[in-house]
């Protein structure tokens, strides 16, 4: 009888452990943060952050006991882009690659994990509507191209085209890919099939000259190109063919100035977002360079940053910011008039004292 009781208790313990081991990971719940705060009408909301596989996988008792499987977090993320249901994030850590986060399917895959292909140092990334993904490899001086299934199809570019390719941006209507050449102090423009079309920018501090540009963004309204002119501590705007239009910003420690501008993106109203790795914040300017709002500061909690890097804003004005030293991608929503009109009931929820989680 005693043996049966011990066996029964052991069976119950093992069953409970098995149940715990199979439990799905809980989605990380975070409080929404509004900018500006209520009672003002909010224009931007912090929604959530993604860290990689830990967002969707529960490490079980047996995983800990036997040491498998390995749950991979994102290490040293830099660039971000989205298409369809997927969020693409370049990783520049000890295992360079591209994480493909699919919140809808609750999984994370890795781009480029196939025979005979290896990344050197993936930095900038851009994704076309058809699912084609372009990745800048700063070490290999190449643009790697993947199809919608994540298979490497081709690579283009060489040291004759750029010295260190960094940020990427796509103009869908013109079928163009803009590549920030950081060490070459310019921007090289290709067709989406890899044909070199033109190049603009040269080293210097004058209008139209660049000094270690890191990232580029396309204004979908008119095709203008916004460039984070990092070591000139400013933003420069060019037309689609590289003609200089305007510039704004300078080095300093007051709002509207820059310390280390890196990520850059443009929303549907033409507002320009600049991630500053030195200030650990995002500053938002209208298309003329007038400061509208800034948000974020140094920290680990939601709404804070440690060295923000690449940025991307999709066609629905969802904002993705790579928070490099916190190893995550932070997600925000810009409440454009177009978005509010399309989502009136959802927007009303944000106007209550307790916004949705």
Image: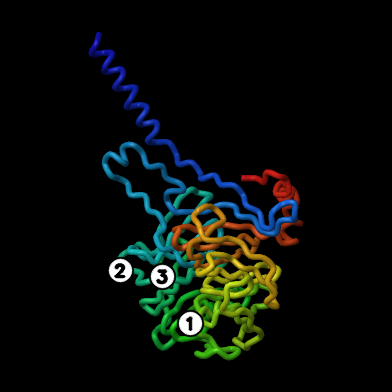
Q: Residue furthest top?
A: 1
Outermost residue toward the front in this view: 253
Local SS, label 2: loop
Please provide percent x and percent y for residue 68: 30, 45
| Residue 131, percent from left and from top | 52, 64
Task: Give the residue pinned by disc 1.
Answer: 212
243 relative to 330, above or below = below
Report if residue 176 is visible in the image: no
Q: N-terminal of the two: label 1 or label 3?
A: 3
Q: Earlier in the sequence, mark 2 or mark 1?
A: 2
How far apart are the two marked residues, 3 and 2, measured between alpha carbons?
17 Å
Question: Along the horizontal axis of the image, is 80 left or right of 74?
Answer: right
Q: Secondary structure at mark 3?
A: strand
Alpha-carbon neighbours of circle 3 within 10 Å: few (<14), some, or many (≥20)?
many
Is 57 rendered above or below residue 20?
below
**Foreground disc of the pair 2, 1:** 1
Count of labels shown? 3
Q: Residues within 10 Å of mark 2 (few under 14, many from 20)?
A: few
Q: Quadrant of residue 256?
A: bottom right
């Amino acid at each position: 009888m005693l043996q049966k009781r011990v066996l029964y208790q052991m069976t119950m313990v093992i069953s409970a452990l098995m149940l715990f081991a199979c439990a799905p990971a809980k989605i990380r719940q975070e409080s929404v943060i509004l900018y500006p705060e209520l009672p003002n009408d909010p224009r931007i909301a912090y929604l959530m952050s993604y860290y990689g596989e830990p967002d969707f996988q529960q490490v079980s008792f047996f995983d800990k006991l036997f040491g498998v499987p390995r749950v991979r977090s994102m290490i040293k993320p830099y660039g971000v882009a989205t298409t369809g249901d997927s969020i693409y994030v370049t990783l520049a850590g000890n295992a360079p690659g591209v994480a493909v986060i699919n919140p809808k399917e609750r999984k994370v895959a890795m781009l480029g994990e196939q025979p005979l292909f290896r990344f050197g140092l993936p930095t900038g990334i851009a994704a076309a509507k058809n699912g084609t993904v372009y990745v800048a490899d700063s070490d290999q001086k190449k643009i790697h191209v993947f199809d919608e299934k994540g298979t490497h199809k081709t690579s283009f570019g060489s040291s004759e085209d750029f010295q260190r390719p960094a940020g990427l941006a796509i103009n869908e209507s013109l079928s163009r890919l803009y590549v920030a050449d950081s060490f070459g102090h310019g921007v090289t423009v290709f067709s989406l099939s890899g044909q070199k079309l033109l190049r603009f920018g040269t080293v210097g501090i004058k209008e139209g000259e660049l000094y270690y540009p890191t990232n580029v963004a396309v204004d979908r309204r008119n095709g203008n190109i916004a460039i984070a002119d990092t070591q000139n501590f400013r933003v420069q705007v060019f037309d689609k063919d590289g003609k200089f239009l305007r510039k704004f910003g300078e080095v300093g420690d007051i709002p509207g100035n820059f310390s280390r501008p890196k990520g850059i993106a443009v929303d549907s109203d033409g507002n320009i977002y600049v991630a500053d790795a030195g200030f650990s914040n995002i500053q938002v300017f209208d298309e003329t360079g007038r400061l509208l709002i800034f948000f974020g500061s140094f920290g680990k909690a939601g709404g804070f940053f440690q060295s923000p890097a690449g940025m991307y804003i999709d066609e629905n004005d969802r904002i993705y910011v790579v928070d490099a030293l916190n190893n995550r991608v932070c997600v925000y929503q810009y409440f454009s008039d177009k978005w509010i009109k399309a989502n009136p009931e959802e927007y009303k929820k944000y106007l209550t004292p307790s916004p949705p989680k």
